[in-house]
Image (spheres, helix red, strand yellow):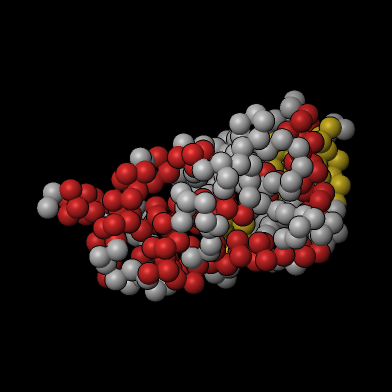
Amino acid sequence: MYIKNLKMRNVRKLEELILDNGVFNTEALMLLFKENSFPDRVPRVFKYLDMQEMPDVMEKKDFTVTTLNSLDEYLSIQNLLIPDTKVYVDGKLAGFALPFIPNHHNVGKMLHDCSTPFCQKLFYVSQIGDIISKVQNVSSDTFRFQFGDLNEYNFILSQEGKINAIDLDSAYVGWNEPQEMIYYLLRNKIVRSVPEKYPVSKQLNIIPTDDTDLFCYHMILLRVLAKEDFSCLPIEIYNDYLDYIKKLPVPHELIESFESLYTIKKNWNPKDSIMGISENLEEKLDYKTFQKNYYHK
């Protein structure tokens, strides 16, 4: 790993990375290091963290980044943009830097942009599933890496068409108390009714596992299919929607995968079934169409 030592006056001179419209980073200021700042002459994004006065959070992030940089099996997954630089400001750890992908687009924004073709959205989601699969395939009984707060905004698309996972300093590597996951799991209270599958810590935070990552992945996919966030809806509506799409030519394996989420069965990755969804189904899969056809027969 690189170590970068800065004075605050140098931080103020760095250019801010402007995020896509509608994309927000609530825990850091994103700054740019130019290519001449590092021996390998690769520009980097400096994630200047807001929680520097929270030593327990900074310690956990430091451990996560250091651990991931020590494991070749994760470093070899090219879709993971693992921070490779610790940045100290006035002698204090202030954040981490990772290789900058120029001219990238945020995948979450593209998935929820009506101008993005439906088939393209499905392809992006299947590619996210591939990344999750790569990570889970190299996990072992002695070490597991979970994305934790998995959501579509933590993936970017390069100009070459490659999807990369970002925000990995917030990942979970099985150390310390897990933080409450703020996206799909925090807003979903139903998962807590299946503690055998979605365990909680003593502080009542959901412990990240392969099942929680795959649960979030299913929520990303459902949000693309229905244009609705099902993590906030009652389970009765969720079941009604599954009953509705069973009557459509949706791959059976995909429906089975959705049905497993709130049972004690292990979740599995539906990535290989996603491209079997016909683009002609876009309107029928829409949540508003479902409501109109299912509840107003």
Residue at 23%, 54% in the rendered image: 290
Residue at 75%, 25% in the rendered image: 53
Q: Which residue extends farthest top?
A: 53
Counting the numbered discs, the total is 0
Q: Quadrant of residue 14?
A: top right
Counting from the top left corner in percent of width and height, residue 149 is at 58, 45
Counting from the top left corner in percent of width and height, residue 240 is at 28, 51
Residue at 81%, 59% in the rendered image: 71
Residue at 52%, 51% in the rendered image: 264
* Image: 160 above or below 11: below
Q: Which residue extends farthest left?
A: 297
- Horizontally, is 95 left or right of 273 in the view? right
Counting from the top left corner in percent of width and height, residue 186 is at 51, 37
- Horizontally, is 76 left or right of 258 in the view? right
Q: Nearer the viewer, residue 81 or 281?
A: 281
* Image: 33 above or below 93: below
- Horizontally, is 234 left or right of 44 in the view? left
